[in-house]
Image (cartoon, helix red, strand yellow):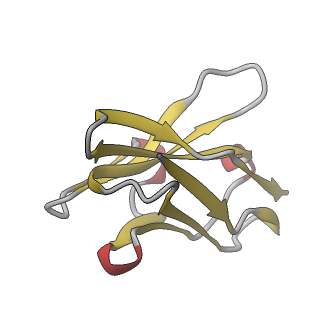
Amino acid sequence: QVQLVESGGGLVQAGGSLRLSCAASRISGSIFSINAMGWYRQAPGKQRDLVARITSGGSTNYEDSVKGRFTISRDDAKNTVYLQMNSLKPEDTAVYYCNANLYVLYSGTNNYWGQGTQVTVSS
């Protein structure tokens, strides 16, 4: 149906920046529309939490600890969502997962997840 492909993780020093990308692509010719896309993160031993989310109308919301440092955006022509992360802190270290709420023709609305990308911030 649809797959999410993430890129952009890596190792960075505290205070540095990274940009994550997540592209939604069709499998087997499926047709879909995007309701919302977002980024979650999961640190070792912790639950997966929402970091930022953007709706089809462009509304955004952020987890409190990243407000003012992270910016989520989307390119509808490319079915891609981005997470620009500035002023990174060691506590931002986690596996970051892309999430998309999609309507897929003949399949309905479902949540899809990317494979995850590691972000490590050294102090």
Q: Is residue 87 above or below residue 65?
A: below
**Residue at the front extreme, as displayed:** 28
- Where residue 104 sits, quadrant-wise, is top left
Pinpoint residue 23: horizontal percent, then vertical percent.
Answer: 51, 65
Q: Is residue 83 above or below residue 60?
A: below
Give me the residue at 37% from left, 70% from top. Answer: 73
- Where residue 31 sits, quadrant-wise, is bottom left
Give me the residue at 47% from left, 52% from top. Answer: 66
Quadrant showing the C terminus: bottom right
> Is 106 in front, or is 45?
106
Horizontal relation, residue 41 to residue 60: left or right:
right
> Is 34 in front, or is 89?
34
Pinpoint residue 51: horizontal percent, then vertical percent.
Answer: 47, 45
Pinpoint residue 108: horizontal percent, then vertical percent.
Answer: 25, 34
Q: Is residue 55 above or below residue 105?
A: below
Horizontal relation, residue 71 to residue 107: left or right:
right
Total labels: the figure holds: 0
Q: Is residue 49 above or below residue 58?
A: above
- Where residue 85 sits, quadrant-wise, is bottom right
Pinpoint residue 106: horizontal percent, then vertical percent.
Answer: 26, 39
> Is 13 in front, or is 2?
2
Give me the residue at 48% from left, 64% from top. Answer: 69
